[in-house]
Each structure stands twice: as C-alpha cells, then as structure tokens.
Amino acid sequence: MARPRVVLSVATSVDGCIDDTSPQRLILSGPQDLDRVDGERAAADAILVGASTIRRDDPRLLVRSAERIAERVAGGRAPQPLKATISSGGRLDPSARFFTTGEQPKLVYLPAGVEAPHGVRAAATVVPAGDPLDPALVLADLHERGVRTLLVEGGTAMHTLFLTADLVDELQLAVAPIFVGNAGAPRFVGAGVFPHGPEHRMRLAEVRRVDDVVLARYLLGDAR
C-alpha cells in the first residue's frame, strides 16, 4: 500500500517523559525549538495526534508563522495542513480546538464498528480503519487524500503504535535538560515490540543544539 512519509516529532525530558502529572501542560521546548516544529508543520500535508492528546492538551495543530502560511499558499497548497486523530472509542469533544480552529479538513480514524458522537461526525470526516485499528490503513487513506508527508506529534499511544508497526521514516527527538521524576507521568513510548532494537539500530542523521534542547534526528526503515 502506498503511504505518506511519516515524521514523528517528540520532546521529552532526560528521563523520557513527555509531560508531568499537573493539570497544566509541561512545555519542554524553548522558543527556537517550537519555531522549528512550526516549520515541520508547514512542510507537512497533515498532522496527526491521538485522542488522548486532544483531551489532555487541547491543541490547535496550526502553522503559526504568517510567512510560512504565505509560502504554502504561494506553492499552491492549502494554508494549513489537514488534521487527523485516532481514537479507540470515539470519545472526543467536538468543541475541542482540534475541530474548531482552522478551515482545513479534520479526519477521525476509528476501529470498524465504533460510532463517533453526532457532534464529532458533524465537525469531521469519520473513517473506519480496521478491527482492530490498523495504522497502515490510516496511512493508506491519508495517501489517497493527497497526503505525502505526515507529521505525528503524539502522544504515547500514537508514538508506540506507529513505531512498533515500523511505519515511521524519521524520528525527531528533542531532549530537554530536565528530569520529571514522576512514575505516573506520560512517557515517550509504552511497552511494545519495536523493530529497531539492538540488532537493527536507527541511523543517526543529525544532532544539534536548539535553545538548551538537544535535537537528534534518526532515520528508520527505508529511509536508512
């Protein structure tokens, strides 16, 4: 099946946490790294997060830079990448900013047979993607919709899903110089069988400093 190039972008603490357990979102990146991620969004045709990220962080998932938006339009592209989410049970709030911000299409992928609430169906296109849900079917559907580069931004379940399925071409890992130190904090990935273990190492393509964050870019799969 044809699929988009998949870039997985994540910021973690030194001890591998992507957030803490407080009600407020933990900002791990500085201004320069947040601007870098904005550039990755502008380069993508679609941005995907999991339903738990929508519930926890209420992200807008929009390109912020007016210059980058203008460059997209000048290049014949939509001002904003389309937005996609994966939900196991359809428990999404149609008033979330994922649905209410931006004029671009919103896609909700569900396991076959799972019904989304009426408000979600009114705010987005709901697509069945196998039972159990198959991320390869999600990517195939996105490709049919013209998506050639997909940016996956979280959270733990989505990172784990795409990495264990060997469907990530590039991993962008930003490590902030802090420890969270909380056993209940969400981690970069959960338990799983990952294809890139000791016998199949990822290829390190770049390491650089961005603010006080270390950015490491790894190439996986056919991108090696």
Image (tube, rainbow, N blue to C red):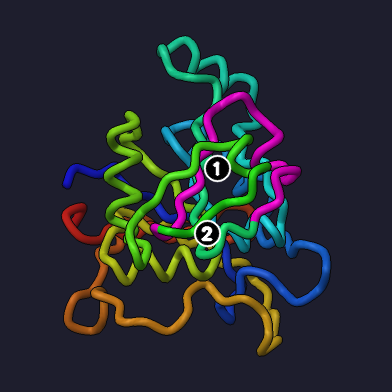
Which x, y percent locates residue 78? 49, 19
Check residue 131 in the rendering and tell me which mark sits there, or answer none. Answer: none
Magenta range is 92-112
Image side of residue 30 versus residue 172, left or right: right
Alpha carbons under labels 1 and 2: distance apart: 28 Å
In the image, 125 versus 147, the foreground residue is 125
Q: Decide which of tag 1 and tag 2 comes sooner along the chain.
A: 1
Q: Is residue 99 magenta?
A: yes
Height in image: 79 above or below 163?
above
Q: Residue at x 66, y 89 (%)?
A: 183
Assign a secondary structure to mark 1: helix
Residue type, label 2: Ser
Image side of residue 141 versus residue 174, left or right: left
Residue lying at the far bottom in this picture: please name it.
Answer: 183
Which x, y percent locates residue 81? 50, 31
Assign a secondary structure to mark 2: loop
Q: Is residue 94 magenta?
A: yes
- CA neighbours of label 2 inside 10 A, class few (<14), some (14 to 19), many (20+): some
Q: Which residue is mark 2?
A: 87
Which x, y percent locates residue 164? 32, 71
In the image, 117 versus 187, the foreground residue is 117
Q: Which residue is mark 1?
A: 36
Height in image: 36 above or below 86?
above
Can residue 203 be seen from the camera position used here? Answer: yes
Residue type, label 1: Arg
Which x, y percent locates residue 42? 50, 31
- CA neighbours of label 1 inside 10 A, class few (<14), some (14 to 19), many (20+): few
Q: Residue at x 39, y 51 (%)?
A: 128
